[in-house]
Image (cartoon, rainbow, N blue to C red):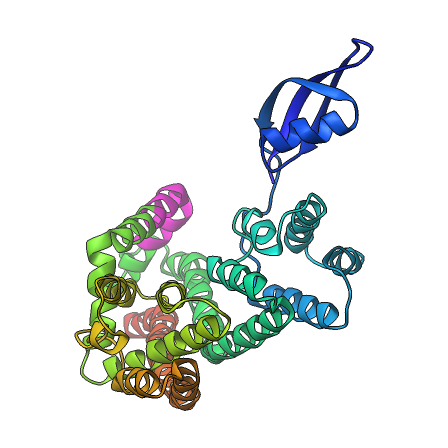
Amino acid sequence: MPTYKYKAAALSGRAVNGRREAADESKLRAALRDEQLFLVNCTEVNEKHSSKQLTSAELIDFCRQTGSMLSAGLTLTTVLGIMLKEEMSDNMQLAVKSVYRSIKLGAPLSEAMAYTGGAFPKAACRMIAAAEENGTVPDACIRLAEHYEKDEKSRYGFKSRLAFPLALLGLLVLLLFAALIFVIPVFAEIYGGEELPPFTAFLRRLNVFLTDKWLYALLIIGALAAVIRLTLAIPSVEMYISKRLVTMKRAGRLFRVIYTSRFCRTFSAMYSGGLSVISACAAAGEDIGSVYMEKQVDEAIKAMRRGSTVRAAFESADGFDGRLRSAVLAGEESGKLGEMLSAAAEALEQESERAVKQLSEFAERVIFGSAAFLTLLIFAVIMLPVYELYLAI
């Protein structure tokens, strides 16, 4: 809720200044009137709220605890008060405090979560809002926790498999720079004033550049990184790369399975949680992680708003696995769209795990190939000057 800096007048005529949270100016005026204070003027101030989204683990913990304690009969303020006594990260504590203050001022949970400034995903706020209308907030919180647990499991597998290869690649890069900076000067001293062999002379010039003009080297590396990052941020470039990922011959099918699995899981969770088909579809589209797929979902939503069925809306979407259309057709025919999407999500999750494994294995081969190339470079930096020195002798 917004915080207002106000100036009020008491019955005695005394001026009172202060700060207070309220939904709007009229609610602030009413709250002050209850204390026999009359609002003179007020201005909204920007208090510090959590603008950084909570991690998956933090979201799971918040939703699981909230759902469990609400199911046990505790009030929401009591639940949040208990959570604030636990050890947690600064970002999560800031978010929970913001929700707690808003709840005490009479805001519903969905609005309190939305006002944290981005700590909670929009899809979670929408699902809680729908659950508040149906009176199923505890169940919605538990369902959200289960959803984020599955999502975290699928994302963690890929990152964990690449952690060691990336660490090895980084270590080899450091060793290469160390060899260039510390080993090459030793060979230069051995040669003395004699003319250096071509390869050793090239390494010597590179060593001088890295040691004497290291600031320029950092600027060049930074400029290249900035150019690459800005290029990838161009909407047309981002769209092209995103589209290529799902239209490639072999790897494209793996990405389609992963994206479709993620979409079905979120779509099913949001629709079963009480959102309308369009709202659930929009929330699932935001969770895919592909701009090309999000564009296709947006086009499908536009078609549904024009009166199209869900299956017909996704008929022209070429980035999704065909089982999505089959699940939607079965759901529309049987009237059990949520259950059909859930069944499709479970089937696709198993294949998605295999797809993630195959992609991570391919990435591992690329990284290990790069590591082997760096190893050869390090060997060349050290051994070729030795070989040239041997020939000179």
Picture residue at 60% right of the left edge, 43% below the top:
49
Residue 224 or residue 155, whichever sits in front: 155
Residue 169 or residue 260, whichever sits in front: 260
Percent across and percent down for residue 274 are: 49, 69
Question: Horizontal placement of 42 versus 200: left or right?
Answer: right
Q: Vertically, is 174 above or below 255?
A: above
State the quadrant of the N terminus. top right
Q: Is residue 272 magenta?
A: no
Q: Quadrant of residue 197?
A: bottom left
Percent across and percent down for residue 374 are: 36, 72
Question: Horizontal placement of 32 versus 277: left or right?
Answer: right
Residue at the extreme top? 13
Q: Vertically, is 27 above or below 169?
A: above
Residue 198 or residue 88, whichever sits in front: 88
Q: How many marks?
A: 0
Q: Quadrant of residue 146?
A: bottom right
Q: Which residues are magenta?
A: 205-222
